[in-house]
Amino acid sequence: MTYRWSLAPAQPALAEHLARELGISMLLAQCLLNRGLSEPVAIAAFLDPRLKQMADPFLLPDMGRAVERLFVARERDELVVIFGDYDVDGVTSTALLTEVLRTLGWRVEWYLPHRMDEGYGLSQDGVENCLAKFPAKLLLAVDCGSTAVESVGWLRQRGVEVMVLDHHQVSSPAPAACALVNPQLTPVGQPGFRELCSAGLAFKLAHALVKRGRETGLAGAETFDIRSLLDLVALGTIADRVPLTGENRILVTAGLERLNTTRRPGLVALKEVAQTAGTIGVHEVGFQFGPRLNAAGRLENAAAALQLVLAGSLAEAGPLAKALDAQNRERQKIERSIAEEVIGAVRARFNPESDYVIVEGQLLWHIGVVGIVASRVMREFHRPALVLGGESGEWRGSGRSIEGFDLAAALRECGDLLIRHGGHAMAAGVTIHPDNVEVFRKRLNEMARRTLTPEQLQPALRLDAETSLAEMTVERLEELARLEPVGQGNAGVHLAVRGVKLQRPPMRMGKEQQHVKLWVTDGRAVCEAVWWNAGAARMPDGMFDVAFVPQINEYKGKRTVQLKLLDWRAVRQAAKF
């Protein structure tokens, strides 16, 4: 795939001012400017995130009402049922609230819907099955419920009050919940809660409960340390791919510290089966922990993942972690099979001039993995992609989008063709009758052709700055590491060096010789670069520009700079970025 190199505008005067004011390098200052940070006070807070910087949880919409209703439930000894979701965010937020409420004296049970049998969120089947198992009068919907108008109405008619703690878009009209704690309803000018996922919201609710408990003399509130919940918050926040900015940055920074020292049996067992070595960071959570916790909910029911997180001993946690690991391998096998089928079919007839949105569906494609497949299709063709599967009368699917195309808004415009839909601008879910798929595909493409420009259909490679190989030292990279944790909304540092050449011939690596090690020089310094999964791609020759992620490679106690190659361009083709 051909990338469109996009170099952030250099701001030397402002970068120099910040560098002098804060005692940092010009390169780090430029990277901070690229992330929208130009004030020394805001930058200082960004580079040193602390829990004390977080806003009062009672500033969230309806938080006061939710806390008051929960305290009434405790006084009446009412059963509170937490109705969660089957992904990592839903599992961790359900576990967090189960733990804090039980510890502080509430009577609590939890319920997670079955993806295949009950569908997403507060579905009619889901709430009926939940009440049959736990005949409660108070239900706390977590990571779902913001559009469940009919289900919440049905529950109210039966005398069941519903509280919603969720971060997804709210329907109009909103469900008639007794409390709707959703950051999307935060008034303009209030603290920026909008990027919080449900694990972050659960932490805020826990904070609010403990705070009110300490004010009212609630037994156990004074000694309850909410920081013990941060490992769960980090898992949910990273896995849900919300922006790692604002309070999410604070929560993930503190949460990763907690995760690296956690004695929570379920996470210790998960680390063992994932064979996670060394420090646990965003990558390890996103690619080792998250997929295993997600596997149960994708293939069957997420109860095993929640039981693992809540496990009280390694003897209980070990078998659960091994079962999730086996389910994850099965999930990978199913996903690969469907992805190969979808990508092969699309590639055979893909027309980049007219195909702006990809919609593929087939009977019996496993609905638990279609979201992951949609992500792979989106990356392969750089087009919004929806992949559908299911049974003959009703297909369900997931979509992933590209910058510039609001998928959730597009689905709303196709509401007459859909049975159900919901989600975010970049990721959404849909239920549709198979007879409507062709019309659905056509309408989405018509909308996308009006919305997207040809430039947006070419993936952008965003670069922070031009630099020199000489500046790529261990000390400089340690300084740039202050931008971590990096991820969604706070991308890792991408740099470019112009006019380099190979200092020696490339060296193939890997079992299938699919990786390449290069040594590049700009005439003053030499750096080792690795091109992962280069395959049969053409190797650089002559003079070329190189785009890369700078990394520190540790081997046998020695730390050296290594460049992770992103792209290269012959000098004659890259006079401008």
Image (cartoon, rainbow, N blue to C red):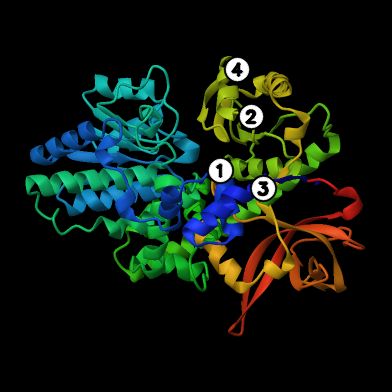
Q: Which mark is residue 120?
A: none
Question: Toward the viewer: 475 or 289?
Answer: 475
Quarter assignment of residue 150: top left
**Mark 1–mark 2 distance (CA, rounded to whole Å):** 24 Å
User: Given the image, on which type of amino acid does mark 2 rest?
Assistant: Phe
Q: Which mark is residue 417?
A: 4
Taking the spot 66% from the left edge, 64% from the top edge, the residue there is 550
Residue 187, percent across and down? 35, 27
Does label 3 or label 2 sit earlier along the sequence? 3
User: Given the image, on which type of amino acid does mark 1 rest?
Assistant: Gly
| Above-or-below relation of 186 to 273 | above
Q: Which mark is residue 405?
A: 2
Q: Which residue is mark 1?
A: 368
**Mark 4–mark 3 distance (CA, rounded to whole Å):** 47 Å
Query: Quick one: SS at disc 2?
Result: loop
Q: Which residue is mark 3?
A: 10
Tell me if I can see residue 435 in this picture. no
**Mark 3–mark 2 distance (CA, rounded to whole Å):** 28 Å
Q: Residues within 10 Å of mark 1 (few under 14, many from 20)?
A: many
**Mark 3–mark 1 distance (CA, rounded to whole Å):** 44 Å
